[in-house]
Image: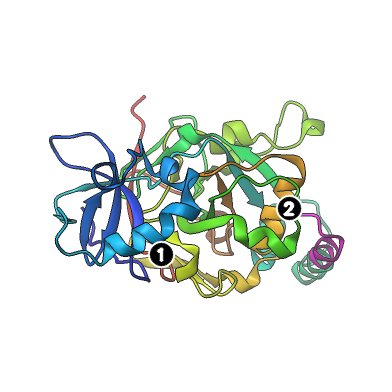
Amino acid sequence: MATLVQPVGPFALGTFSAPDGGPFPGLLAKERVLDLSRVLDWTPSGVRAVLERWEETLPVLHSLADDDALDWRPLEGLRVHAPVEPRQIFQSGANYRQHVIDLEVAHRAPDDSRTVEEVRAEIAALMDRRAAEDLPYVFIGLPSALTGPYDDVVLPAWAEKPDWELELAAVIGRAAHRVPVEEALEYVAGYTIANDLTDRATVFRRDMPAIGTDWLRSKNAPGFTPLGPWLVPAESIADPGDLRVTLKLNGETMQDETTKDMLFGVARLVSYVSQSARLLPGDLVLTGSPAGNGIHWGRLLRDGDVMEGSITGLGAQRTRCVREAV
């Protein structure tokens, strides 16, 4: 297993398992883990169950984290799974200014007469309009695409251009429907890391261009969204709008940007999603990926590649790519 990077704050949540047992919801503090299913007055089936009673349980978690007399296990030797099993995943696209500009340049038609500078200027103006009109772009992902933060990522044989997209993910702690921006962060229990992989070759429908994007095909292969390692309580993150997002490929830095470059921050995204859907405890709101994707570098994922992703205060994940056998 990769070296585990500890989260900020007094504790974090995660899903763990010992070699001889099944997954359990755990409290991580001081490089040790407490099985919450054994110490709470009620028996949570997983981290999502903890989030469903988040407001009443959060003070209890603080007390447990300081209790050295409990049956703590060393973190070393435990398997770390995706920290939560959401019912719904909402994914924000085109939410980092520089990322969108880079994608537009990379996807220019061969006969496009505009210069690179002209393309950048036009897309920058479009980004300003989107921000002013308060129109995030959000689509829906499948929980079955999630995998653990240290698990291998299987690249499907049909995926011609698999790409990385490291993102800050907000984890919902209260049911939210039609909440205003000013109150939206009150519904966020914490944050984690998501690497929202995309097969660039299947994003756009070639057979029927008028349909537009095909997110089912391009983003939802099993294991295409490594999640975690930890769920860090929101109270431990001073400002989700000022976190550094870094992804390294085989040791070389590819993405290195702060969440300041987001067009729509966490509060605006959560509020926007809640206007149409009812957010539920444990749901994920992925906030988009910064510049530095493989399509920008002209280097897509291959068999044997190792991705290391980190976000300030949230730890780090490390996943190895394995090409599916034909």
On the image, the x and y values in percent for residue 135 come to 80, 55
In the image, taking residue 126 as reference, residue 49 lies left or right, namely left
Q: At numbered mark 1, what does the secondary structure look like: helix, strand or loop?
A: loop
Q: At numbered mark 2, what does the secondary structure look like: helix, strand or loop?
A: loop
Seen as rendered, the residue at the extreme front is 41
Pick whichever, 250 or 109, lies toward us: 250
Q: Quick one: quadrant of the C terminus?
A: top left
In the rendered image, residue 106 lying in the magenta stretch gets the answer no
The residue to which callout 2 is attached is 179
**Label tally:** 2
Report the magenta stretch's main SS.
helix
Which dot marks residue 314? 1
Pick whichever, 279 or 61, lies toward us: 61
Q: Is residue 5 visible?
A: yes
On the image, the x and y values in percent for residue 270 come to 67, 54
Q: Residue at x 31, y 42 (%)?
A: 152
Earlier in the chain: of badge 2 and badge 1, it is: 2
In the image, taking residue 254 as reference, residue 132 lies left or right, namely right
Magenta region: 126-136
